[in-house]
Image (cartoon, rainbow, N blue to C red):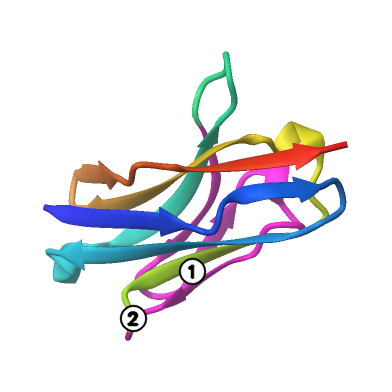
Amino acid sequence: QVHLVESGGGLVRAGGSLRLSCAASGSIFSINAMGWYRQAPGKQRELVAAITSAGSTNYADPGKGRFPISGDNAKNTVYLQMNSLKPEDTAVYYCNAEHGPYSDWGQGTQATVSS
């Protein structure tokens, strides 16, 4: 019921930055929280950061201190500012929206960090 469109991925050198955006549409009134996950080749998808509709944030260890998450309720958009990028951050980054017990996912955006 929630449509998510990610953007902002690309190729960057180690130490550089990328800013990912996730725009939500559809049943946006039902969203409780949104988050960013990533999946590297051959690895499981993992949480990066999440933010609730009230503005509370939650960070997983890989990007903690480097990847602040923020949201703009007026624009129904969540951002992930990825700083001090490392080659191991290379992954497809997916936006997630939680509404009640359900989750919806975006198509993903590729972030590649070269050494």
Which residue is the site of mark 2? 75
Q: Is 101 placed left or right of 66 in the picture? A: left
Question: From the viewer's perspective, is the residue at label 1 or at label 2 nearer?
Answer: 2
Residue at disc 1, secondary structure: loop
Q: Nearer the viewer, residue 49 or 90?
A: 90
Residues at badges 1 and 2 in contact (C-beta under 8 Å)? no
Q: Residue furthest front?
A: 11
Residue drawn 38% across the image and 71% down it:
77
Let me know if residue 76 is in the magenta part. no
Residue at disc 2, secondary structure: loop
Q: Residue furthest bottom?
A: 74
- Taking 4 as reference, is 62 above or below it? above
Residue drawn 76% across the image and 32% down it:
88
Amino acid type of the residue tagged 1 in the rendering: Ser
Give the image quarter of residue 103: top left
In 3D space, how far apart are the residues under numbered discs 1 and 2 (Cα atoms)?
18 Å
Label 2 crowd (10 A; few <14 / some 14-19 / many >=20): few
Q: Is 84 placed left or right of 11 in the picture? A: right
Residue drawn 68% across the image and 35% down it:
90
Which mark is on residue 56? 1
Q: Position of residue 78 (x, y in %)?
A: 44, 67
What segment is highlighted magenta in the picture?
46-74
